[in-house]
Every structure is written in C-alpha cells, then in structure tokens.
Image (spheres, rainbow, N blue to C red):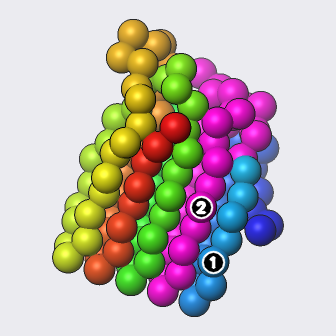
C-alpha cells in the first residue's frame, strides 16, 4: 500500500472498504495515523527508529481491523476506547527502554491486535 507521508516523520494509512499491508521503516519515526473503516490494515513497524524518546500511533477501527507488529526493544503503552470492539495486546514490551510507543485506539465494532 501507499502510505501518505504527512511529513518526514509522520505517515497516514487508510483502508476504506479494502485491505492494506505495509512496512514502516522510517528512520525518524514520530507519528502514524491508521484508519480501517469496513476494511483491514496489517502494518509492520519492527524496523522503525524513533526520533526522540516517544512515538505515537493513533488507530481507528470502525467495522474493521488493524494488526500492528512492533519492535521488542521499546516500551509499549496502550490506551483507547472500545465500543462493541476491542484491543488485544500480545506484544512483548521492554519496560526499561527509554524509547516508548504510545498507541491510542478507538474500536467501534472493530478490533486492534498488537504483537511483535
């Protein structure tokens, strides 16, 4: 899929009545926005290099699903709003890492899966 480069360190993915698969290998990663509306997204973030200490991923799954594959060497924090949907965090998180990925999700009749 094509991600929409918002800036050098930001990307946006949208799956609208479709499915996307992709890899984000950004060398100065800061932020992503992912939308799956009546569709699905499977995205691999294992090779990103976080600019600074904190990076963000905002996920919206409405009647759709998002699967995120994240690196193991970062701290992973997940917060969100499930409305007849949910989030399953299967990822291994390095609680001692200075690098952190914060995931904020909204799942309406949809789901988010986080793994390594």
Q: Which of 67 and 82 is in front in this view?
A: 67
Residue 98 covered by magenta stretch: no
Instruction: Check the picture and name the quadrant holding the N terminus.
Output: bottom right
Q: Is residue 71 above or below residue 67?
A: above
Q: Is residue 67 left or right of residue 111?
A: right
Q: How many dots with numbers? A: 2
Dot 2, how many residues are within 10 Å of its Cα: few (below 14), some (14-19), or many (20+)? some
Find the distance from the CA under tag 1 to the CA under tag 2: 8 Å
Q: What stretch is highlighted in magenta?
A: 24-53
Residue lying at 73% horizontally and 50% vertically, measured from the top left: 23
- Tell me if I can see residue 53 in this picture: no
- Per the rendering, the mark at residue 58 is none
- Residue 42 point in image, percent of width and height: 59, 61
Element under disc 1: strand
Q: In this view, does 105 lie above or below 35?
A: above
Q: Is residue 44 above or below residue 35?
A: above
Circles 1, 2 touching at the beta carbon (< 8 Å): yes
Q: Mark 1 points at which residue?
A: 19
Residue lying at 30% horizontally and 57% vertically, measured from the top left: 87
- Tell me if I can see residue 25 in this picture: yes
Dot 1, how many residues are within 10 Å of its Cα: few (below 14), some (14-19), or many (20+)? some
- Dividing the picture into quadrants, the one containing residue 49 is top right
- Dividing the picture into quadrants, the one containing residue 12 is bottom right
Residue lying at 35% horizontally and 74% vertically, measured from the top left: 110
Q: Name the residue under label 2.
A: 42
Residue 25 covered by magenta stretch: yes
Q: Main secondary structure of the magenta part?
A: loop
């Amino acid at each position: 899929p094509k991600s929409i480069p918002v800036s050098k360190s930001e990307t946006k993915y949208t799956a609208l009545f479709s499915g996307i698969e992709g890899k984000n290998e950004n060398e100065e990663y800061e932020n992503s926005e992912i939308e799956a509306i009546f569709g699905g997204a499977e995205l691999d973030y294992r090779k990103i290099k976080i600019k600074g200490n904190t990076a963000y991923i905002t996920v919206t799954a409405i009647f759709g699903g998002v699967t995120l594959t994240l690196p193991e060497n970062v701290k992973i924090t997940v917060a969100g709003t499930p409305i007849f949907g949910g989030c399953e965090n299967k990822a291994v998180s390095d609680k001692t890492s200075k690098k952190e990925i914060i995931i904020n999700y909204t799942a309406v009749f949809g789901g988010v899966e986080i793994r390594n």
